[in-house]
Image (spheres, rainbow, N blue to C red):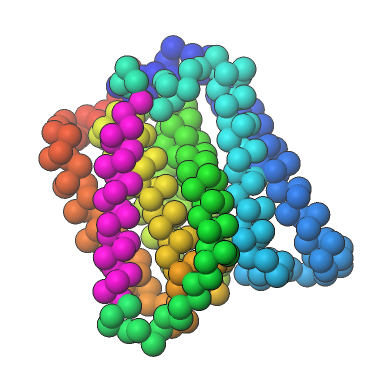
Amino acid sequence: MFIKNALNIKNSILRYALGIFVIFIFTQIGAIPFIVAIFNKVGVEGAAKLDPSNMMTILENSNLTFFYTLLSFFVGFVGFLFVIKFIHNQSFLSVTTSRKSIDYKRILTSFSAISAFIILSTTISFFISPEEYVLQFNLNDFLILVLIAIIFIPIQTSLEEYVFRGYLMQGLGVLFNNKFIPLILTSLSFGFLHFYNPEIMKLGSVLLVHYIATGLFLGIITLMDDGIELALGFHAGNNLLIALIVTADWTVFQTTSIFKYIGEPDLISQSFFTMIVVYPILLLYFSRKYKWGSWKDKLSGKVN
């Protein structure tokens, strides 16, 4: 059982609190270059007036902004590795999966599944409303984007999955001796982590429901599959394809993607369809492919 892996490490609540603090500090250190770049651009007073909605466009080079944004996650991931090794004496494998080795085929499966959906849905949307898309493809800028995205987006998404579906899921599971409580708490915390995303400011706080539901979906596939491999692949595929294919003025990733969406976002078609159709379909697909069973025990049973 995945959560049980944390029973064999130094797992006191104080160590987990310290671990989260250390990871946070590392991510803030990683954000320093971006902060310095903003100060150099607009000065201290100008930077103080910025809000998250325009911070991502303050630098003229969107690829540079994208790199700076992802750099904090890279440093944060180094912090995470430090925490599990030196604070918990935990192996990287045990915070990843209950299997004897990391199943990279699972990562590729979920990566491919969400990538196929994004490509299909974007293609359909383009043909239905081509006037809402602007082709902004520039080969040199796009190649730089691809290089940054392929290297850093899997690190960004992996940090989030390891912290929420791995580290905290295990720690809270051991603390409460229960699986359902950490499933709910990690989903809520994952959702509110995105509170200051530009999408929230554009569409309203109701969009938090989408992020919480995404956290719940990722938590369910983690507990049912006894590892975070499926969550790792899904999250990486989602962010990578979005960054490369289409951007908008109100999205967190301001990139030199192939297309720019200039239409008004539709909350129902862009979020609730994913929650009520796509996620259930993926759950059904994964459950049949990997022959999941004992749903009640795996999602709400006791840990020990």
Viewer-proximal residue among 266 and 154: 154
| Residue located 57% across and 57% down the image | 144
Viewer-proximal residue among 179 and 151: 151
Task: Please identify the dominant SS of the magenta region.
Answer: helix
Quarter of the figure with the C terminus:
top left
Residue 169 image position (x, y, % from top left): 42, 32
| Residue located 86% across and 65% down the image | 43
Q: Is residue 62 left or right of residue 192?
A: right
Tell me if residue 257 comes above or below residue 149 in the rendering. below
Residue 293 image position (x, y, % from top left): 14, 32
Q: Confirm whether residue 269 shows in the render.
A: yes
Instruction: Give the magenta-colored segment's residue range.
Output: 102-125
Viewer-proximal residue among 87 and 124: 124
Quarter of the figure with the N terminus:
top left
Residue 232 image position (x, y, % from top left): 39, 40
| Residue located 42% across and 37% down the image | 165
Q: Exactly how many numbered labels are in the figure?
A: 0
Q: Is residue 228 left or right of residue 291?
A: right
* 118 inside magenta stretch: yes
Q: Confirm whether residue 14 shows in the render.
A: no
